[in-house]
Each structure stands twice: as C-alpha cells, then as structure tokens.
Image: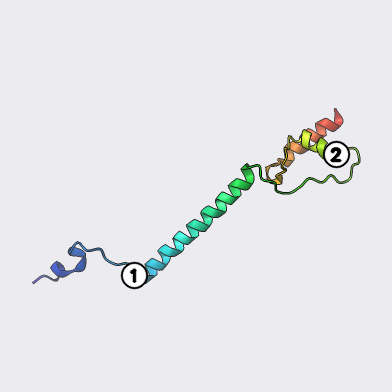
Amino acid sequence: MDDKQYHPSNSGEMQSSTPVQDERAVFRKRVLKIGGAVTLVLVGLFTLPIPFGSLKIIGSDKVTVQDVMVAGDIHEPVNILQISTEKLKTRLAKGLTG
C-alpha cells in the first residue's frame, strides 16, 4: 500500500497553516492597515484645505502677513505643509525689489 494515497494534501482538503504563519499574516494585515491610515492622513494634510499652522512675520515692520499671503499665493485657512518656501522666497524677492 502507498502512503501517498492517505496523505491529507492528496484528499483535497486544505492544509491548515502553522500558528507562526497565522501570526505573520495577522501582523502583515495590521501593518498594512496602520500604514494605509497614516498615508491617508498625510495625503489629507498635504492636499486638503485643513488649517495647520500659522504665519508670523519676524524682523520687518513694512511687510504684513497679508503681503506674504498675496505674494505666496497662500489662502485661508493656512496650511503650512502646502506652502512652497522656494516659490515664496522668489516671489517676495521680486515683490520687494520691483
């Protein structure tokens, strides 16, 4: 008699995974869920008009917050994650000299 005939994998039944594999699968799912949630929060902060931070002008009495907002194309509510500092520097330099 051949032992292969009576092996559980030959009977069409699913083999149960080991507890270590189950733990790894649960861990992977948990990491994917947490990673997905963090990604959604970050995408929301960078794209949606959510108030995050504030503008404060230091060192000049001649430039107001409104001047900086107009020059930097910054809209209310202010989200500092959406401000491009390089573009803002360039626009302010052009606006102050010209």
- Quadrant (top left/top right/bottom left/bottom right) for the N terminus: bottom left
**Among the 4 quarters of the image, the one containing residue 61:** top right
Question: How many discs mark residues in the rendered view?
Answer: 2
Q: CA distance from mark 2 to mark 1?
A: 66 Å
- The earlier-in-sequence mark between 2 and 1 is 1
Q: Residue at x 85, y 32 (%)?
A: 96
**Among the 4 quarters of the image, the one containing residue 19:** bottom left
Checking the image for residue 51, the label placed there is none
The residue carrying pointer 2 sits among few (fewer than 14), some (14 to 19) or many (20 or more) residues within 10 Å by Cα, namely few
Q: Residue at x 45, y 59 (%)?
A: 29
Classify mark 2: helix, strand or loop: loop
Nearer to the camera, 67 or 8: 67
Name the residue tied to disc 2.
64
Q: Is residue 2 above or below residue 80?
A: below
The residue carrying pointer 1 sits among few (fewer than 14), some (14 to 19) or many (20 or more) residues within 10 Å by Cα, namely few
Name the residue tied to disc 1.
18
Q: Residue at x 86, y 46 (%)?
A: 58
